[in-house]
Image (cartoon, helix red, strand yellow):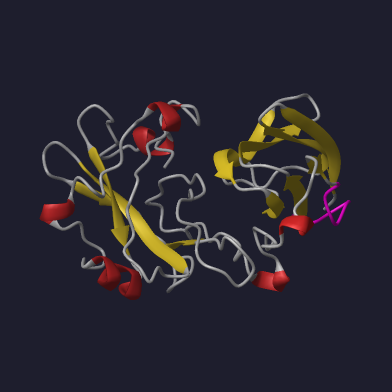
Amino acid sequence: MDMTEAMTYEENAFDPATDSLFFMWQDAWGAELQGVGTNTVPSTLRQTYLYRSTEHSRTLGENVQSVTIPIVGPAPHAMMYTTKYVKADGTEVSELGSGYGFGRYRTQWLKPETVGGSIALVQGLELVKFSNLGTPLEVMPEPFANDLTFVLPVSTEVDNLPTTFALSQNYPNPFNPTTTISYVLPEAVDVDLIVFDITGREVTRLIDNRSHNAGRYDIMWNGLNADGKRVASGLYIYKIMAGDFQQTHKMLLLK
């Protein structure tokens, strides 16, 4: 959660030195599975839902905080949530969204390991910005929409497993607003997949040092940068790093 703008509020601005930021479920099913209520942080679980500034979150920005939440299954397909911070004097500042359901609450989708398969055991949510302005909160694209998935099935047949590393050209290309990037791994390895602009500046990390088994994989980019904002039309470069293997390709976003 990027708290930069919240630190500039005229009233009750966020102070990372004294204030506590919390995650709050807004999806009743997800909350019930975890044994908690919606729109609240149970006193016995406050440490579980407390955001912190860690070395990992600081790499995304000076004022970014993160939280790791163990989820009791069966996991919900989507996570609807908001955050709030509690100031030293007890004042609470909650995120506000307009309307009902999607847009009133943040919505981020849990992604499958395989097509039609189980939810990935460990995964990260998109970086978003705290907002109490009453405007719609970010709703991330559903990974299953239009038959798009984040990971292709991995064959259980040894003979069908890839024998070399490869990064394919994204499809479609040019694209708007989403495109799919495919890659294959002949062995278990940690993977980074990063999008850069034409000047070489990092735009977003689609995969951040995530462990993979050997197989064929597919990930979608929705044209958002690390701050969750739409990027401009133009030429972009994506790069995979998997062990000693590195490869890049160019892709063109048109609007």
Percent x, y of residue 164: 80, 41
Considering only vertical position in the picture, is 134 above or below 228?
Answer: below
For the N terminus, which image quadrant? top left
Q: Main secondary structure of the magenta part?
A: loop
Residue found at x 48% / y 48%: 124
Considering only vertical position in the picture, is 115 above or below 177?
Answer: below
Residue 30 falls in image quadrant: bottom left
Instruction: Judge whether residue 174 is colored magenta.
Output: yes
- Report the number of discs: 0
Residue found at x 55% / y 61%: 111
Residue found at x 32% / y 54%: 70
Instruction: Judge whether residue 176 is colored magenta.
Output: yes
Residue toward you, 164 or 208:
164
Is 141 positioned to the left or the right of 106 in the image?
Answer: right
Percent x, y of residue 246: 75, 30
Considering only vertical position in the picture, is 134 above or below 224?
Answer: below
Q: In the rendered structure, which segment of residues is drawn in magenta? A: 169-179
Residue 34 visible in the displayed image: yes
Residue toward you, 85 or 51:
51
Residue 104 visible in the displayed image: no
